Amino acid sequence: MHSASHRLNFDEHRTLFDPIANPKKGVTIAMGILVALSAWGALCYFLQWRYGLGASGLNQPVLWGFYITNFVFFIGISHAGTLISAILRMAQAEWRRPVTRMAEVITVAVLFIGAANILFDLGRPHKVYMPLFYGRYQSPLLWDAMSITSYLTASSVFLYIPLIPDIAILRDRFADRKWLHRFYQVLSFGWNGNPKQQKVLNVGIAIMSVVVIPIAVSVHTVISYIFSMTVQPMWHSTIFGPYFVCGAIFSGIAALIVMMVTLRRVYHLESYLKPIHFNYLGVLLLVMSLLWFYFTFSEYLTGFFGHEPSEMRVFWSKFTGPYAPFFWTMVFCNFVVPVIILSFKKLKTITGVLVASIAVLIGMWLERFTIIVPTLANPRLPYPSGIYFPSWVEWGIMLGSFSFFVFLYLLFSRFFPIISIWEVHEGKEVGVKEVEERVKSYLPESAANVST
Amino acid sequence: MTSQWSWNERKTFFWQVVLLVTFYTFIFGIVIWILRLIWLSWQLKDVFSASIAISLIAMPLFLFLLGVYNYVFWGILLNRGKSKKGGKD
């Protein structure tokens, strides 16, 4: 056995090895269903490829619908991961240990799907190579491509570096399975946990934690620029950057909670993901809900106060017009539900936090939808206003996108531990002592110590 | 690579280097793409300054990420020490 795992009792963390060693039949069936749904999405995309955007409900003046809504939504929930994980690591929050990996995987998985939705929006992507060869770097669309690529690269590195010790543990654990062992052997870079390697790893994680935060913030700011750099009514807003970042973190936390509750149940991770984790994340969700309401209120109040005719057409279409059901459901899901559930201790159970998170995910999707579609349906220029009905092809692609995300997540959990084994182990061995010393260092020294 | 390495260890090292080279290719592909767009904006007199401004952030960032990956890759690989069997882990 390599020294990477000589202090680790495999049986102690058996629950974490089980999804890899003894995959559950139910999970395999679920993955099969998800593949079928993803294939359905792929078939819908094939139809759109063949017949162009005529197969979708997109038409003048609403040329951005489900695809761009999904794009913004998916990139938003990607903030779960890296940002939350990086902040918790930098703050040395000890409760982060079983949470960070789950968050980081969300980021990498959804970024692929978010970016793919841009391709879906192109319809027949026969000119997709044009930005590669003739792109204009002063276009916010190209800034977006650049920021998402940098975020995906940074998130992948940030996921991989803390994964190396766990891969080494798996290499040792599955020494009897030839191909699996070889696979882990390549990916573990010869990790054996000696102090020099540990130092390199810690430095790598620390650097990435610092770097990834501004990248994550810039990504959603740049996404908001796609809208705010135009002079379309209710898009041309200076607070769109922070508003989008706030919404992204908000939906990211919700997605993380939903994943945590689901995997806790499926893989029996009750001893790792305890009520206190959901309690802390619930508090974060509540704070973000209040912040989201503040931004939404500011955004609509300033628009209303200006009373510009083209802005007001969009405003009323959301408040009392055809988009009112979506708008008010958004407010209900993003503010009313989470605030009521998360403010009362009795309601803030794991189930309660899950309900609030699902509501937030629905609400945040509707938020993206109500930002994009009503503005395009009521353009500033004297074009006729329009209404948008997504076609079954768009529904199919959307279903495929969500299914593929969950499939990628489950696929990861079939090959890698979804909870960081070495970090949990480290927390048990040295974390408790470290926290004690850290807390002592915050407190004033006793009179006896000062006098000496 | 030393002669002490077994065939299996050489194969493992080969695939590890393939991973590293893939990452290098990806990063330098992006850098070349950015340079190509800057060159194009220069040729077409199409707000060259804006292209330079964006690339001043993007290119160092990608190269920095490559640097971190390199640091971890070689830092772990070169510090693995000898295993009990006399070869490398």
Image (cartoon, grey):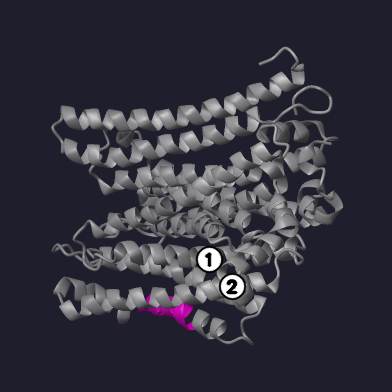
The mark closer to the camera, 1 or 2, is 2
Give x and y (percent) for residue A53.
36, 49
The magenta-colored residue range is A320-336
Residue at the spot of label 2: A451
When asked about the image quadrant of residue A163, the answer is top right
Give x and y (percent) for residue A136.
24, 38
Name the mark on residue A142: none
Magenta residues: mostly which secondary structure?
helix
Above or below residue A180? Residue A88 is below
Specify whether residue A330 is painted magenta.
yes
Q: Amino acid at mark 2?
A: Ser
Q: Tell whether A298 sits left or right of B46.
A: right
Asked whether residue A436 appears in the rendered view, the answer is yes
Q: Tell whether A281 sits left or right of A217.
A: right
Q: Amino acid at mark 1?
A: Ile
- Identify the residue shown where x is 38% and y is 76%: A327
Q: Secondary structure at mark 1?
A: helix
Name the mark on residue A253: 1
Above or below residue A40? Residue A362 is below
Specify whether residue A12 is painted magenta.
no
- Identify the residue shown where x is 32% and y is 61%: A241
- Identify the residue shown where x is 62% and y is 52%: A409
Instruction: Give the position of the N terminus of chain B as an image quadrant.
Output: top right
Name the foreground residue: A83 vs A141: A83
Pointer 2 indicates a residue of which chain?
A: A
Asked whether residue A41 appears in the rendered view, the answer is no
